[in-house]
Amino acid sequence: MTLRRCGAAERLRRVPAAPVFQAALGAAVKARRKELGLTQEQLALRGDLQQRWISNVETGKRNPSYASLRRLAVLLELTTAEMIDRAEASERNFHSDKSSQHAESPRSRGARTR
């Protein structure tokens, strides 16, 4: 079965590049950590992790392995699926914000810029 026949090719084109998902994952991790009222240091101590590693995940500089993602989700009192769902929601919001900014820009309304 080819990618075209099953529609996977179209879905694959809609999957963002890794850096966008890393940033969305980081935003989801940070938001959940704050929901729990934890600092990066407190989260690190909970799971025998480095505070710098958590910071790098939150800022999108680090792409955690699946095993690390599972471990991080447990520390944040989520399932791995919930963590990924939150990251994807953050990613959708990012794309939605970008498209609305583009729609509101002077260039998109036909105004001349200097």
Image: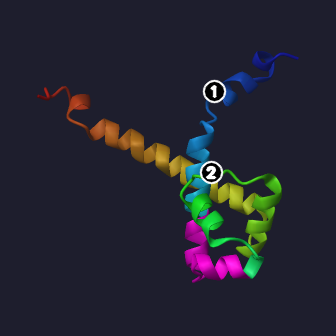
Nearest to N terminus: mark 2 or mark 1: 1
Which residue lies most toward the right here?
1
Query: What residue is rendered at 54% in x and 47% in y?
Result: 92
Percent of width and height locating residue 52 = 61, 67
Query: What residue is rendered at 62% in x and 59% in y?
Result: 57
Instruction: Give the structural element (helix, strand or loop) at label 1.
Output: helix
Give whichever of 112, 23 is nearer the camera.
23
Percent of width and height locating residue 6 = 80, 23
Q: Is residue 90 left or right of residue 4?
A: left
Q: Amino acid at mark 1?
A: Arg
Dot 2 crowding, Cα within 10 Å, few <14, some 14–19, many 20+:
some
Question: Does 54 appear in magenta?
Answer: no
Percent of width and height locating residue 112 = 13, 26
Q: Is residue 40 left or right of residue 111?
A: right
Instruction: Give the structural element (helix, strand or loop) at label 2.
Output: helix
Give whichever of 6, 63 is nearer the camera.
63
User: Mark 2 — residue?
Assistant: 88
User: Mark 1 — residue?
Assistant: 13
Q: Which stretch is magenta? A: 29-45
Q: CA distance from mark 2 to mark 1?
A: 16 Å
Q: Amino acid at mark 2?
A: Glu
Give the answer, above or below, for where 97 lies relative to 56.
Answer: above
